[in-house]
Image (cartoon, rainbow, N blue to C red):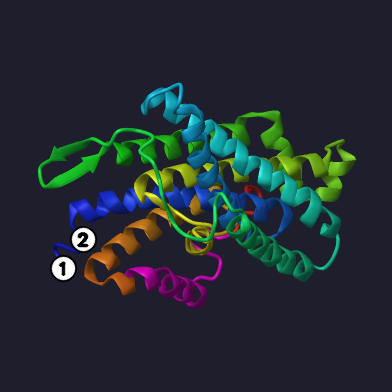
Amino acid sequence: MGSIFSPQQIVNGLQLGAIYALIALGYTMVYGIVRLINFAHGDFFMVGAYAAFGSFFMFNFFLPPGNGLAFIVLILAMAAGAAIAVITDHFAYKPLRYKPKLSSLVTAIGVSMLLEYLFSAIPAIGPSPRGFPEVLPKKMFHFANVEISNYVIVDLAVAGVLMIGLTFLIQRTALGRAMRAVSQDKDAAKLMGINVDRIISLTFLIGGAFAGAAGLLAGLTYPRIQPYMGILPGLKAFIAAVLGGIGSIPGAVLGAFIMGIAETCATAYNSLLGEGIAFVILIVVLLIRPSGIFGEKTADKI
């Protein structure tokens, strides 16, 4: 059991948890605002990965792999994730905003499948996996019995900066106050002069940008991408949001890190168990505490 819960596995779990956290935040923000479980969110993550892949080769003619190129690729991956999220909201979800919730849920599943098959059908992409380039040269550091690559540091740093920025946005800005108002009562927010549709679009934009960043980090960490790569990470990030308390930003982050550590430790014991541990966690949470660790806070649920 010592090898399963070794410091190395914990480090790997934190790295995976950082990627899950960025995806889970999109789920929990959209749910908090619109009460929609956006099952297409994992595919926004896939779009970000492909945008990072393409932008690397576009700018690699001018810049060598390194911090400068990695920053440009990150910005473009986030922009692609944000763009596909806003487009999806405008054309697929907005017309159903005041329809039964089941309509939006089914539409989200349809959008997810559309994006996957659309990307598979593009000749330049295709359905086959592709190797992801080294946007940053990989370096290894040794601390006692733990090996830490610079990719671990980058994953945690990018996720940490984005999560801190989101917290500041929600708690300290006018936009954040408007988002909290819309999440609590849309009708009252309208009476206060808040443009609810604009706030919803911005929520999708932020969540999509985070998913795009996660796509780049996943490509760096596990250097293989394909059009269906968002299915399992999307489901696992959703489970992480449920575990922490969907609608709660701190809950989504905590649930994602718990999920990442649980998966890497279970994988060290058995790879198939590692793939299935997320769904075991989901069943246990739904049986014991359906509201999640933090529950759903009515005053702070975006």
Q: Residue furthest left?
A: 144
Q: Residue furthest front?
A: 123
How many numbered circles does the render carry? 2
The amino acid at mark 1 is: Met
Q: Is residue 159 left or right of residue 148?
A: right
Is disc 1 surrounded by few (<14), some (14 to 19) or many (20+) residues within 10 Å? Answer: few
Residue 1 — which label? 1
Dot 2 lies on which element?
loop
Query: Residue at 56% of width from left, 56% of height from top?
Result: 42
Q: Is residue 272 above or below residue 14?
A: below
Q: Is residue 120 above or below residue 282?
A: above
Using the image as rendered, state which of residue 240 and residue 215 is in the foreground: 215
Q: Is residue 151 above or below residue 286?
A: above
Percent x, y for residue 40?
63, 58
Percent x, y for residue 102?
76, 70
Q: Is residue 32 left or right of residue 258?
A: right
Using the image as rendered, state which of residue 253 and residue 222 is in the foreground: 222
Dot 1 lies on which element?
loop
Residue 5 — which label? 2
Range drawn in magenta: 274-295
Query: Are the residues at dot 1 and dot 2 in contact (C-beta closer than 8 Å)?
Result: yes
Please say whether residue 176 is visible from this viewpoint. Answer: yes
The amino acid at mark 2 is: Phe
Percent x, y for residue 122?
61, 54
Residue 33 — which label? none
Please say whether residue 166 is visible from this viewpoint. Answer: no
* Residue 294 magenta-highlighted: yes
